[in-house]
Each structure stands twice: as structure tokens, then as C-alpha cells.
């Protein structure tokens, strides 16, 4: 039988150098200011759905048949081509 000593948990703690402390996290960067809270009735304000803005307005057509064909092809669903 061998008389050599087997290393245990106490032996490894003595031979290992101490670990450095983990770096501290950087403080959070300030972001853009949050919008203020508004406690009025949202139904009193006009929404974008209440207006016709952005609902496919096109410049006035000059009666050109090529422009009419282009508009027809733009607005035609793909399954009708």
C-alpha cells in the first residue's frame, strides 16, 4: 500500500491563487426622457383613423390613359392578373 497522501479539497485551496473580484457593471446610460402621462379622455382627441389622410390619395389624373392603366395595374389584386 502506498503511503503517499492524496490531495483533497483543502490542498487545492492552498495551492490555487485567489480569484480576482468580477468587474463592477457600468452605471446605466440615461436614455431619452419618457413622455409625460396624459390623463385626459383619449376619445376626445381625433385619431389618424378619423381623417382621410394617407388613404391612397394620388395626384390629380390628367386624363391620360397610360396613367389610368398604371393605376389599374397598381390597385388590382395579384389573383386578378
Image: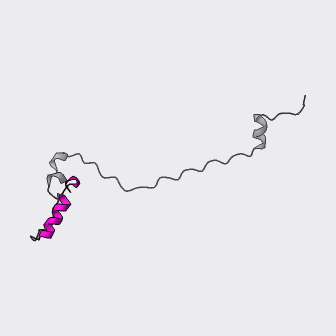
Give 40 or 70, whichever is nearer the viewer.
Answer: 70
Q: In this view, does 56 lie above or below 16?
A: below
Q: Position of residue 24 (x, y in %)?
A: 57, 50
Q: Position of residue 50 (x, y in %)?
A: 14, 52
Q: Is residue 11 above or below residue 17?
A: above
| Horizontal relation, residue 36 to residue 27: left or right | left
The quarter of the picture where residue 51 lies is: bottom left
Residue name at image x 50 percent, y 52 percent: 27
Give 34 or 73, whichever is nearer the viewer.
Answer: 73
Q: Where is residue 40 in the image (x, y as percent from the top left)?
A: 20, 46
Q: Position of residue 35 (x, y in %)?
A: 31, 52
Magenta stretch encompasses residue 31? no
Q: What stretch is highlighted in magenta?
A: 56-81
The quarter of the picture where residue 80 lies is: bottom left
Q: Residue furthest left?
A: 63
Give 13 or 30, whichever is nearer the viewer.
Answer: 13
| Horizontal relation, residue 27 to residue 57: left or right | right
Q: Residue furthest front?
A: 81
Quadrant holding the C terminus: bottom left
Residue name at image x 20 percent, y 61 percent: 74
Magenta stretch encompasses residue 60? yes
Amino acid at each position: 500500500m502506498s503511503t503517499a497522501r492524496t490531495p483533497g479539497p483543502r490542498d487545492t485551496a492552498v495551492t490555487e491563487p485567489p480569484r480576482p473580484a468580477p468587474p463592477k457593471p457600468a452605471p446605466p446610460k440615461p436614455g431619452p426622457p419618457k413622455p409625460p402621462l396624459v390623463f385626459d379622455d383619449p376619445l376626445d382627441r381625433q385619431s389618424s383613423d378619423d381623417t382621410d389622410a394617407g388613404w391612397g390619395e394620388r395626384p390629380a389624373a390628367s386624363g391620360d390613359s397610360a396613367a389610368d392603366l398604371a393605376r389599374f395595374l397598381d390597385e388590382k389584386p395579384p389573383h386578378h392578373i
